[in-house]
Structure formats: structure tokens, C-alpha cells
Image (tube, helix red, strand yellow):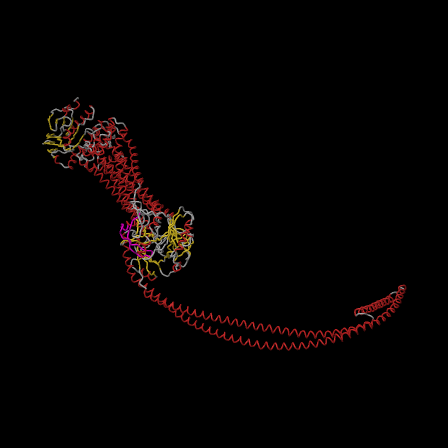
């Protein structure tokens, strides 16, 4: 049994009289400590997969197993706990709380966790020790994203899920962020899943899952994943 | 809740401070109003109750048909539950002070009584029965001033039956819990209202019984006197007293019976004594008359005797006199003879003798002789003297000769001596010759003298004889005169005696007549006295048991009206604050909904991080609850500080209230704050709930806008095609965003409604003065006439009044206060009996309020006022029972209902009156129309003989205006609050509206809409919604206004029921004004919207 398994997962949105099938039967599995890239065109369903995997949304049918637990059968409360303890999420648009400083944003996540990492350390890890008392509005995009990553990391989750983490960042900053993610995965053995529509990044991952029209079009395993510094695009 | 989430919450508060403050303000206003107005009633209640307790205001008062005595008081003291029992005496009088007449209730107090204590405000306590305490009073009306000397009278002139004094001097001013209301209820004097009171020491009263007994109940003070618990507490004691009444009243009856019997017996004794006395007197008088009669008879006899005596005596005297007269005549004859003899014989003879002597000596008369004699005597004397001298000289010479030795001298002396001797001889010779000559002379003289003497004596004899005769004659004459006199006197005396006798007879006749009369009279008196006694005995036998009436505080006019006022305030408190409350809840709902919507992304993040639903919602809950708690706190403080005071002061104009006792009604405070907190929390939860139900991923995406649809207006191409683009958008927006539309409209409607209600109340209250006193009443005042004036006198009075300056018209009619009732509901109304419809309309503008159909007064029924009809639940054709002037009750048919705002009125014709009561109504007032009122007009009128009292509406209007001003204060406060509310709601709504559509607005800006167009985009919607809201608000406000007016009205007042069109328009305008002001401030907010920031999207 893999660490993460999706079996026949479907997601149908009912909007008024219309049913939109975001996921039309998705199957894949991910092993612990894998660095997975989920790629695909816009609207393919990547975010939907990640959202469901991260407990932020529910599936209509199918099985989702994470570390032995049936996520699809979890109720509201269980999902909340799942998100609280097991998941770390990084968004495209950072979604930091504007009223809290960088440090406080990270603390926000750790204050409800079971075994959080040291906040200050995590902030240092992302290289923001000098900016930890600044508010998001005082930080650049890259810095904000790094805060978001620190937030996710500090939770000490089982999974680190990132939805287009570099989408709002420039080339270099984006690379930095990716490096951070890659290092975390490698050094801490964290399972990381990244969504991107930038196919150049695919060599980075241990596994590349390609999504098209709500279905998995291909799953590729990289024997030798490349360090992100090496990749140019 | 995690620490940082809390931090986030607090920082959010700081960042959206305006929103927070809005919420805070709304809650503060709502709570202030709720607590303040709700607390007003309990505070009023507690303040006056405390005052009542401090002054031991009576719990019960008992009246008896026979009054009370000490025994009753003692008996009452034994009743279980009674604390203090005091007997009071009171009487209603007309007090005259400075030509103003007051209807005064004079009450006694005991210096050490522990009940109904009054508070001495000025002056001092009375020291004797001529001093009294008067009312300090309030702002509407004060009592008689300090130092005034009041003459007290009663219309039936029986003041002495009650009071020992006719004049009272005011030495102190007091307030008393007995009269908290400026209105004091009716007096016992032909239903006139009591205008003021006086307290006097018990000695001022001449009655020996108590007019009423006042009682406090043990433990009643612990309860609030206006509560049901208190009433329940008092009831059993009241019942016990009523039970006691049955025995006590018998005791009293017996006592009175006994007293009456004693008096009767005294009366009987008096009668007996009187009768005896009468009889004695009659006998005595009769005796006296008989004596008198006898005296008269004796008198008559005496007169007769006297007359006889007079006759005989006067006859005898006359006879004596006649005899004397005869003697005298005889004597006179004799004397005459004598005299003749003397004159003719004796005297001449003597005279001739005398003559011859004279001739003898050679003289012609005696004088001559005397002269001669004197001469000779002179000679003699001379000679003698000379001789003497010579002799003396001789002696001298002798002496000298003896002594001297001088020869010459001796010679001389001797010579002289010789000479002298020679001379002496000569002298001696001469002397002898002279002396010889003298003898015949003196002899002659003597002879003559003798003769003269003889003649003289003869004559003297004759004279004396004549004298005697004359005397005698005189005596006889005198005697006759005397006899005449005596006779005259005696006759006079007899005549007098006769006259006296005649008088005596007349007197006797009178006396007899008088005696007969007196006897008759006396007998009659005795008979009357007997008849009275008989009747008295009959009356005594009819003496019934006394009836006691036990009254609690509800029967005290002052206490009851205040209780009603408190109830009124409670009603207002129940209605108005609820409104604010609802509006506050609404605003909170909108605000929090918007906030949650705006922050849905944040919520999504938190949910993604694994925060539970409650934790996420708690941010907003804290936000709302914190605002609510703070607002509640501040609102409570301000509400309690402002509202109860304002309301209390406003009512204080109608009442004489003790100082306000502010206290915190904790139950109210907790209730209202709790309510607000709960509601705010609930609405917030409700607003957040929806978001909580969404999965985090959905939250992270923006809310999908409601789908565009064609609106109804679009189906009307005629109109639709004419719309400009912005108008079309506005129309669509309004209809699409129904929730926003509803919230705005409701919020605005609420505020407009409050404004309308506020202005409406002001209108309703202020119009009554104009409508009632200028329109409906065409007369300016009334003059009450003395009782029992004859028609001619009444006409006189009317003429006099008509002649006063300023008077243009007057009318005679009947008017009195009467109870009117339907089944068990009772109201007091003034009955006016106008001769006919024309006279009624000459003094009043009688009309329907709701339509312009004419009202006609005829004999078929009575016209009553609208409020009375309402209170007694009557319509045209129903039956109403009305009292007559002598308190007989009969039924009448309601023929019409007229508009009237103050007091109740019943109009009828004299025929209707007579048909019902069987007697004619008495003309007792004049209604007077003035062109203008001179400053001494009232005085002049009250001076007119026949005028009992005067009331002109000038001062009444003033009183009303004062009361209205009091209410106006309350109203103004309402309006200000409503205005504030409107402003806050509007700004909040607009604020929220804009933040919700930030993206939209930014897009517009990007597209190139200029500032004005962007503004209009929002404004148009706002204005239309505001306008629609105010129109609804008008309707709602009118209903609210009506509701409040009905709550606030007192029984005897009907406030105007309409909101003036001006007020309606004003309310809308004010609302629109606020909208504009708010919109103006919103421009700044609109301008601040950054295009890029707003358009940064999550997805």
C-alpha cells in the first residue's frame, strides 16, 4: 500500500442545473518522501486533486487513502483534524493573514499542531529571520511565499502540498522557492506534491503526474530527479 | 482559540475601526434607549414609592356615612396587620384670597401623626387654629402663597358646622404624597375640582367626629406601592377592615342613636320646662293684667274723690277770701275817713302853728332857721374857741411870766395879758349875747321839729294803716290767685290722671292683646316644638347602621393617575426600544455578513490550516460581541443618565414629584445587554454559518456572484429602452441583489418610521391646543353663577358681563360634571345643556373628525366626544347612562359623536334633560366670547354679584402648553435618537455596500468611468433604495405613531390622531438629507478604491 492512494476519484460540481465533472476518475499513488509534480493545462483538474488530497474539498466518489486512513470517509471534524495535523498547504497567492507578522503567520499554524517545529528555526530555514516581524504588506512576493512555506513546514505535516507555488514569483525567486521545497523533501523526507503548469519542472520530481481533462493522462517516475538549480527555463 | 488568531481578531478590529464603531454605536444607541426608557418607569415608580414610604403615605383610607369616633380608631388598631391608624377631618370650602376664589380641601393633621407626613418646604408649622399650611406645588400651578390670609366659606353657608375659624393664614408651604398630581380630583362641592389644599391643626375644626381614617399596613413599605404584589398584600387587611366595619358601624350607630336619644330627651325636658315656664308666665301675666285692671279701677275712683275734694275745698277757700275782701273794703272806707280828717283838719292846723313859730323868730322856713342857728352856733363856737385860745395864751403867758425874767418880755407879756383879758371880756359878753340869741332859736326849732314830727307821725300812721290795708288786699288778691292756681293745678292733675287713666286703659288693652298674641305664639311654639320632638323621635328610630367605604391607593386620584402614568411609560418602553433593537440587529447582520463574505479567503486559509469551524467563526463572534458589550456598557450608562431624568422631568411638569431616585435596574440592564449580545452573536453566527459550511477550497475562491437574469422591467421595452446604461445597471442591481435591497429598505424604513412617529407625536400633542381652544371652543371662558339665582338676576349678571370691555358675546346655559357609564365602565364628563342646536353652534364648532358631515343637536339624543365613545365603547345609536345635576342616573341615546380633545363632553337639549330626569335643568353658567382680554378682566368678573367662579381658557391653555412642552422634550429626544439611528444605519449600509462591490467599482474605474460616473453608479442605487425605504417608512411610521399615541393618551385627553403632511415630508427629507450626507462622505471612500489592489484576484 502506498503512502497516498487515489482510487477512482470523481469530483462533480453541481451549479444550478449544470453538472461539471472536474475529475472524471483519477487513480494514482504516491510514496512517502516522494517529490511529486502534478502538471497539466489550466482547468485540467490539478488543483481539484490537490484540494481533495489536502482535505480542503471532498470527492464525489472514489477512495482516497493517506497513510492508511480513508480520507474520503472522513467527516467534517475528521477532515479538519486531518488538515490540522497531517497537511501543510502552500497556495499560489500565499494567503497570509495580513494582520499578522511573518512570524505570527507561522505561529498561527503551529499553535494548533501536535508536534510543530520551532517557529523561529523554520523562519530561519526559509531565510527570513530578518523579516520575521514584518507584515505581509511589507514583504515582497517571494518573501511572502517563503513565509507561507515556513508556515506549512512548521506544522511538521505528513504531506506538503503546493498549488503553483511559484505562479506569482519571478524566475529566480521561484527557483529559490522550489529549491527550498526540494531540500525539505530530501532532508526531512517530507512527501511533497507540487502543482505546476510549467512542464520544465517535471525533471525535478520523483514522480510526475500529468492531468488532462479531469483524468490522469500519465504518471512518470524519474529515476534521477534533477536539482532545480540545474533546470533552466 | 489560538493566540495568533486572537491577535488577528484584535488587529482586524483596529483596521476596520469604522465598522467596529458603527456596530458599537448602534448597540449603544439601542441599549441606551432600551435601558433608559425601560428604566424610566421603574425609576419613576421607585422614586415616588420611596417618597411615599418616607412620608408614610397611607395604604388605606376609610370613609363612613356617619363619620368616625375614637372608638373606631381603637377598634381598627386591633386589626391584624395594621400599623398606624389616624383620624382626619376634612371639608371642602371656597377660599377667597385677593379676589380670587379657590376650591380648597381643608384637611386636619395631628402634630405627632406618623402617617401621610408632609414635607415642610417653606415657612413654619401652625401654632394655633387660625394658621394653616398651603401647597408648595410644582411648575404648572402653585397653591396659595405664603402669608396669604384666606376667607373660607361654603356655598351652603354651613362653614361653622365644620370649621371653628372663618379665616386662615398661611404660615408654611408643604408637599404631600397625598397630592402628587397637580390635578387633585373632585371636591364635594357640586363636583367642582379641588384646586388646592390646606392643612390645619385639628383645633381648627369644630366637628367632634373624624371625616376619614387613614391607615398604614405593617410591612407594606417593603413592597413597591405600584406593584401587584403590594395590592395583593393589602387586600387581606382591607377585607379584615371591612369585616370589622360590620360590627364597628353598629357600634357607631348605637352611639349616635344614644347621643340622639340623649339630645331628644334633653329636648323633651326642655319642652316640659318650657311648657311649665310658659304656663307660669301666662298665669303671672294674667295676674298682672288683673292687677293692672284693678289699679285702673282704683285710679278712677281716686280721681273721682279728688275731684270732689277739689270742689269742696275750693268753695271754702273762695268763701274765706270773699269775707276777707269784705273786711278790707270796710277798713278802707274807714281809713279814707281818717285820712280826710287828718288832711283837712289836723295837718293844716299843725302847719299854721309851725308857720307862726317861724314868723316869731323871723325866718320863713325851717332851713333858714337851721341856718341861723348854725350861724349863731358858729359864733358861739368861734367865741368859745377864741376864748379858749385866749385862755390858753394866758396860761402860756403865765407860764412865761413865771419863767422869764426879762422885763421887756415881762412887760410885753403883761401887756399882752392885759390885752387878752380885755379881749376876753369882750368875747365873754359876745358869747353871752350869742348864747342868749340862740335859745329862742333852738326853742323854735324844737317846736317846729315837734310839729313836723307830729305831722310825720300822723302821716306815717295813715300810711302804715293804708299799707296794712293794701297788704291785706294784696293778700286777698294773692289768695285768689293762689286759689286759682291751686284749682288749676288740681284740675290739671286730675286731667293728667284722667289721661293717664285713659292711657292706662289703652295700655291694658294692648297688653291684653299682646298677651293673647304671645300666648298664642307661645303655644304655637310649644306645639311646633312638640311636633319636632315627635319627628326627631321618628328620625331617630330610622337611624341606620353606618356604612364604611374602604379605599386603597387606587382610589386616591393622585396615586392612581401616577400609577397610570407609570403604566404608560412601560408601554412606551415596551414599544420604542424594540424598534431600535430590531434596527440594531439588522445592522449587525448586514455588517457581519459583509465582513464574513469579504474575508472568506482568510477563512479559507484558516480552515485549510486546520482551524475548526468555531475557531474561524469566533473571530467574527468576538468582533461582534466585543462591540456589543462595549456598546452595551456605554449605552447603559448614557441611557440611565439621560432618559429617566428627561422623562421624569417631563412628567414633573404635571406632577409635584420628589427628587428622582436613580438606581440601576440590574435586571433590565442584564436583560437588555444579554439580549443584544445574544442577538448579535446569533446574527453573526448566522452570517458566518454559510461560510462555515463551505469546503476550504471553495472559500479560497471568490464567491460566485448570483446569476444574471432578466428583470421584469426588461419585459417592458417601452420603458426599458429609454433607460440610460447606468440606469439599466442600477435597475438590475437593485433587483438582483435582493438581500441588499431588502436590508437597505428595511433599515431606511425603520429610521423614517421613527422620525415620522417622533414628529407625529409632536404634531398630535401640539394641535390639540389650537384645535380644541381655537377651533372647537368658540368661547373663551365660563362664568359659574351662584346657586339659586332667579332668572332676572341671571339676566342682570349677563348684562353686566356683556358690558365689560372686550366681551363680544355671552350665552346662558346649564353645565355640570356628571358620571357617565356603560355597564361597569365609568367616566366623568361635563354635560352642557344648550337650548338648541343654534346656541350650541354659536359657542362651539361641533364636527366629526373624520368626515365633514354636519352634526345636529336635537331632542332625540346626546352628542358625546370621540374619546368618551372610545373609552366606553359606544357608537351612534347606543345607550349611555348619565347623571343629572342631582345625581339621578338615566339612560340616553347617543345621537352623534364629535371631535374633542380635552375632557369629555355631553351635549343635550333642555327637553332631552327634562324628558329623562323629570325636572328642568338650572341655568348655572355663562359662556363668554372675548375679543381680547384686559388685565383686570377676571377680577372684574369675579366681583360681579351673582358670580361664583370664573374660568377662562387663557390660563388653561398656558397649563396645557406647559404640559405639552414637557412632552415635547421627550419627543425631541426621540427625534434626535431616530435621526442618529438613521445616520448610523445609512452610513453603515453604504459603507458595506461599497466594500462589497469594491471589485466592481475598481473595474469601472479601469474601464474609464470618471469620478462622477462612479459616484452616480453607487448613489443612484442608494437614493432609489433610500427613497423606497422612506416611503415604506412613512406607512410604518404612521402606524407606529398611532400606536404610541393611544398608549400615551390619558383618559381625558385625545391627542390629534393625524401626522401632519408637513411632518411626513419632513421625515422623508431628513432621511434623504442623511443619505446625501452619508453619500458625500462615501465619495472619499470611493476615491480611495485602488484599482489594482481591488482587482487582484485569488483565482
Tell me the residue at 37%/61% (across/down).
Answer: B208
Up-down relation of residue B897 to residue B391 (above or below):
above
Query: In the shown orientation, is residue B134 left or right of residue B612?
Result: right
Quadrant where the image shows the N terminus of chain B = top left
Residue A147 x, y percent position in the rendering: 21, 29
Foreground of the two, B273 or B170: B273
Up-down relation of residue B182 to residue B1037 (above or below):
below
Q: Give the range drawn in magenta.
A: B871-898
Query: In the shown orientation, is residue B1049 left or right of residue B500?
Result: left
Residue B883 on the magenta span: yes
- Tag count: 0
Up-down relation of residue B656 to residue A162 (above or below):
below
Residue A129 x, y percent position in the rendering: 23, 29
Foreground of the two, B1059 or B329: B329
Residue B825 x, y percent position in the rendering: 28, 53
Q: Can residue B350 be seen in this view?
A: yes
Quadrant where the image shows the C terminus of chain B = top left
Amino acid at each position: 500500500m502506498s503512502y497516498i492512494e487515489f482510487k477512482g476519484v470523481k469530483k462533480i460540481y453541481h451549479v444550478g442545473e449544470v453538472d461539471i465533472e472536474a475529475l472524471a476518475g483519477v487513480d494514482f499513488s504516491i510514496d512517502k518522501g516522494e517529490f511529486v509534480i502534478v502538471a497539466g493545462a489550466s482547468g485540467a483538474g490539478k488543483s481539484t486533486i490537490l484540494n481533495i488530497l489536502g482535505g480542503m474539498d471532498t470527492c464525489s466518489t472514489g477512495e482516497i487513502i493517506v497513510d492508511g486512513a480513508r480520507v474520503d470517509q472522513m467527516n467534517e471534524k475528521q477532515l479538519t483534524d486531518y488538515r490540522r495535523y497531517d497537511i501543510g498547504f502552500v497556495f499560489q497567492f500565499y494567503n497570509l493573514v495580513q494582520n499578522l507578522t511573518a512570524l505570527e503567520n507561522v505561529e498561527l499554524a503551529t499553535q494548533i499542531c501536535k508536534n510543530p517545529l520551532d517557529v523561529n528555526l523554520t523562519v530561519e530555514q526559509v531565510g527570513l529571520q530578518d523579516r520575521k516581524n514584518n507584515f505581509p504588506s511589507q514583504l515582497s512576493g517571494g518573501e511572502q511565499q517563503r513565509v507561507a512555506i515556513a508556515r506549512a513546514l512548521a506544522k511538521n505535516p505528513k504531506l506538503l502540498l503546493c498549488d503553483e507555488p511559484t505562479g506569482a514569483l519571478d524566475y529566480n525567486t521561484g527557483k529559490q522557492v522550489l529549491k527550498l521545497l526540494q531540500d525539505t523533501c530530501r532532508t526531512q523526507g517530507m512527501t511533497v506534491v507540487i502543482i505546476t503548469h510549467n512542464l520544465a519542472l517535471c525533471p525535478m520530481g520523483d514522480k510526475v503526474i500529468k492531468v488532462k481533462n479531469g483524468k490522469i493522462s500519465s504518471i512518470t517516475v524519474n529515476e534521477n530527479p534533477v536539482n532545480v538549480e540545474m533546470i533552466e527555463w | 482559540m489560538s493566540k495568533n488568531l486572537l491577535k488577528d481578531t484584535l488587529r482586524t478590529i483596529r483596521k476596520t475601526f469604522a465598522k467596529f464603531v458603527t456596530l458599537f454605536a448602534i448597540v449603544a444607541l439601542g441599549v441606551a434607549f432600551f435601558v433608559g426608557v425601560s428604566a424610566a418607569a421603574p425609576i419613576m415608580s421607585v422614586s415616588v414609592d420611596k417618597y411615599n414610604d418616607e412620608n408614610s403615605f397611607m395604604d388605606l383610607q376609610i370613609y363612613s356615612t356617619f363619620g368616625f369616633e375614637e372608638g373606631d380608631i381603637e377598634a381598627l388598631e386591633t386589626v391584624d396587620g395594621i400599623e398606624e391608624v389616624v383620624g382626619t377631618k376634612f371639608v371642602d370650602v371656597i377660599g377667597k384670597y385677593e379676589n380670587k376664589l379657590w376650591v380648597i380641601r381643608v384637611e386636619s393633621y395631628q402634630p405627632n401623626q406618623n402617617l401621610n407626613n408632609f414635607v415642610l418646604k417653606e415657612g413654619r408649622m401652625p401654632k394655633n387654629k387660625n394658621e394653616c399650611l398651603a401647597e408648595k406645588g410644582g411648575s404648572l400651578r402653585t397653591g396659595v402663597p405664603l402669608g396669604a390670609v384666606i376667607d373660607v366659606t361654603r356655598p351652603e353657608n354651613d362653614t361653622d358646622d365644620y370649621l371653628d375659624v372663618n379665616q386662615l393664614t398661611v404660615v408654611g408651604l408643604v408637599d404631600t404624597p397625598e397630592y402628587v398630581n397637580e390635578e387633585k380630583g373632585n371636591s364635594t362641592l357640586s363636583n367642582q375640582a379641588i384646586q388646592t389644599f390646606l392643612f390645619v391643626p385639628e383645633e381648627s375644626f369644630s366637628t367632634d367626629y373624624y371625616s376619614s381614617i387613614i391607615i398604614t399596613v405593617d410591612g407594606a413599605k417593603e413592597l413597591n406601592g405600584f406593584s401587584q404584589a403590594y395590592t395583593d398584600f393589602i387586600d387581606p387587611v382591607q377585607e379584615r377592615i371591612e369585616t370589622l366595619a360590620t360590627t364597628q358601624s353598629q357600634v357607631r350607630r348605637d352611639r349616635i342613636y344614644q347621643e340622639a336619644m340623649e339630645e331628644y330627651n334633653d329636648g323633651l325636658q326642655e319642652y316640659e320646662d318650657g311648657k311649665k315656664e310658659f304656663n307660669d308666665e301666662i298665669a303671672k301675666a294674667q295676674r298682672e293684667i288683673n292687677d293692672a285692671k284693678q289699679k285702673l279701677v282704683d285710679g278712677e275712683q281716686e280721681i273721682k274723690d279728688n275731684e270732689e275734694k277739689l270742689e269742696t275745698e275750693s268753695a271754702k277757700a273762695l268763701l274765706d277770701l270773699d269775707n276777707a275782701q269784705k273786711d278790707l273794703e270796710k277798713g278802707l272806707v274807714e281809713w279814707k275817713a281818717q285820712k280826710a280828717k287828718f288832711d283837712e283838719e289836723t295837718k293844716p292846723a299843725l302847719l299854721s302853728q309851725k308857720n307862726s313859730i317861724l314868723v316869731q323868730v323871723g325866718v320863713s322856713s325851717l332851713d333858714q332857721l337851721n341856718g341861723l342857728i348854725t350861724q349863731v352856733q358858729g359864733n358861739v363856737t368861734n367865741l368859745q374857741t377864741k376864748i379858749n385860745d385866749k385862755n390858753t395864751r394866758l396860761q402860756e403867758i403865765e407860764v412865761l411870766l413865771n419863767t422869764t425874767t426879762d422885763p421887756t418880755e415881762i412887760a410885753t407879756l403883761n401887756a399882752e395879758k392885759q390885752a387878752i383879758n380885755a379881749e376876753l371880756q369882750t368875747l365873754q359878753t359876745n358869747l353871752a349875747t350869742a348864747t342868749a340869741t340862740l335859745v329862742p332859736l333852738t326853742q323854735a326849732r324844737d317846736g317846729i321839729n315837734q310839729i313836723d314830727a307830729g305831722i310825720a307821725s300822723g302821716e306815717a300812721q295813715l300810711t302804715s294803716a293804708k299799707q296794712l290795708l293794701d297788704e291785706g288786699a294784696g293778700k286777698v288778691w294773692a289768695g285768689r290767685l293762689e286759689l286759682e292756681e291751686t284749682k288749676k293745678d288740681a284740675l290739671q292733675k286730675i286731667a293728667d290722671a284722667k289721661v293717664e287713666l285713659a292711657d292706662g286703659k289703652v295700655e291694658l288693652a294692648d297688653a291684653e292683646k299682646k298677651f293673647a298674641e304671645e300666648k298664642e305664639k307661645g303655644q304655637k311654639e310649644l306645639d311646633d316644638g312638640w311636633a319636632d320632638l315627635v319627628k326627631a323621635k321618628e328620625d331617630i328610630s330610622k337611624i341606620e347602621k353606618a356604612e364604611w367605604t374602604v379605599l386603597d391607593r387606587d382610589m386616591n386620584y393622585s396615586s392612581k393617575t401616577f400609577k397610570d402614568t407609570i403604566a404608560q411609560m412601560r408601554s412606551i418602553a415596551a414599544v420604542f426600544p424594540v424598534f431600535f433593537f430590531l434596527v440594531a440587529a439588522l445592522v449587525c447582520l448586514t455588517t457581519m455578513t459583509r465582513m464574513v463574505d469579504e474575508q472568506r479567503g482568510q477563512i479559507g486559509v484558516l480552515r485549510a490550516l486546520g482551524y475548526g469551524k468555531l475557531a474561524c467563526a469566533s473571530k467574527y463572534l468576538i468582533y461582534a460581541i466585543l462591540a456589543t458589550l462595549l456598546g452595551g456598557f456605554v449605552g447603559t450608562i448614557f441611557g440611565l443618565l439621560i432618559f429617566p431624568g428627561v422623562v421624569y422631568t417631563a412628567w414633573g411638569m404635571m406632577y409635584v414629584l420628589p427628587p428622582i431616585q436613580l438606581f440601576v435596574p440590574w435586571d433590565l440592564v442584564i436583560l437588555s445587554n444579554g439580549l443584544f449580545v445574544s442577538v448579535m452573536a446569533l446574527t453573526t453566527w448566522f452570517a458566518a454559518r454559510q461560510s462555515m459550511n463551505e469546503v476550504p477550497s471553495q472559500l479560497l475562491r471568490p464567491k460566485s456572484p448570483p446569476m444574471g437574469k432578466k428583470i421584469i422591467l426588461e419585459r417592458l421595452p417601452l420603458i426599458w429602452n429609454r433607460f440610460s446604461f447606468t440606469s439599466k445597471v442600477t435597475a438590475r442591481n437593485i433587483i438582483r441583489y435582493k438581500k441588499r435591497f431588502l436590508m437597505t429598505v428595511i433599515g431606511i424604513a425603520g429610521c423614517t418610521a421613527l422620525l415620522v412617529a417622533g414628529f407625529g407625536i409632536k404634531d398630535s400633542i401640539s394641535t390639540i391646543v389650537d384645535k380644541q381652544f381655537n377651533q372647537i371652543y368658540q368661547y373663551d371662558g365660563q362664568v359659574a353663577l351662584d346657586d339659586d339665582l332667579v332668572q332676572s338676576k341671571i339676566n342682570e349678571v349677563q348684562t353686566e358681563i356683556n358690558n365689560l370691555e372686550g366681551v363680544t358675546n355671552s350665552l346662558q346655559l346649564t353645565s355640570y360634571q356628571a358620571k357617565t357609564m356603560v355597564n361597569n365602565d365609568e367616566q366623568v364628563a361635563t354635560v352642557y345643556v344648550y337650548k338648541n342646536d343654534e346656541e350650541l353652534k354659536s359657542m362651539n364648532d361641533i364636527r366629526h373628525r373624520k368626515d365633514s358631515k354636519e352634526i345636529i343637536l336635537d331632542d332625540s339624543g346626546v352628542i358625546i366626544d370621540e374619546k368618551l365613545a372610545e373609552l366606553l365603547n359606544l357608537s351612534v345609536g347606543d345607550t349611555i347612562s348619565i347623571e343629572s345635576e342631582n345625581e339621578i342616573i338615566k339612560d340616553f341615546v347617543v345621537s352623534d359623536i364629535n371631535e374633542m380633545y380635552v375632557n369629555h363632553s355631553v351635549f343635550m337639549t333642555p327637553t332631552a334633560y327634562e324628558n329623562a330626569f323629570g325636572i328642568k335643568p338650572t341655568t348655572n353658567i355663562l359662556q363668554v366670547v372675548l375679543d381680547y382680554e384686559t388685565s383686570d378682566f377676571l377680577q372684574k368678573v369675579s366681583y360681579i354679584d351673582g358670580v361664583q367662579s370664573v374660568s377662562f381658557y387663557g390660563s388653561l391653555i398656558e397649563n396645557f402648553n406647559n404640559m405639552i412642552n414637557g412632552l415635547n422634550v421627550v419627543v425631541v429626544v426621540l427625534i434626535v435618537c431616530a435621526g442618529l439611528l438613521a445616520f448610523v444605519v445609512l452610513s453603515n449600509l453604504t459603507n458595506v455596500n461599497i466594500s462589497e462591490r469594491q471589485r466592481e467599482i475598481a473595474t469601472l474605474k479601469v474601464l474609464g468611468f470618471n469620478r462622477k460616473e462612479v459616484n452616480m453608479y453607487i448613489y443612484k442605487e442608494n437614493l432609489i433604495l433610500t427613497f423606497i425605504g422612506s416611503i415604506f417608512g412613512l406607512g410604518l411610521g404612521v402606524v407606529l405613531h398611532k400606536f404610541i399615541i393611544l398608549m400615551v393618551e390619558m383618559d381625558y385627553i385625545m391627542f390629534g390622531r393625524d401626522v401632519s403632511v408637513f411632518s411626513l415630508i419632513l421625515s422623508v427629507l431628513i432621511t434623504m438629507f442623511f443619505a446625501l450626507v452619508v453619500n458625500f462622505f462615501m465619495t472619499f471612500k470611493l476615491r480611495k478604491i485602488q484599482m489594482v489592489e481591488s482587482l487582484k484576484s485569488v483565482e
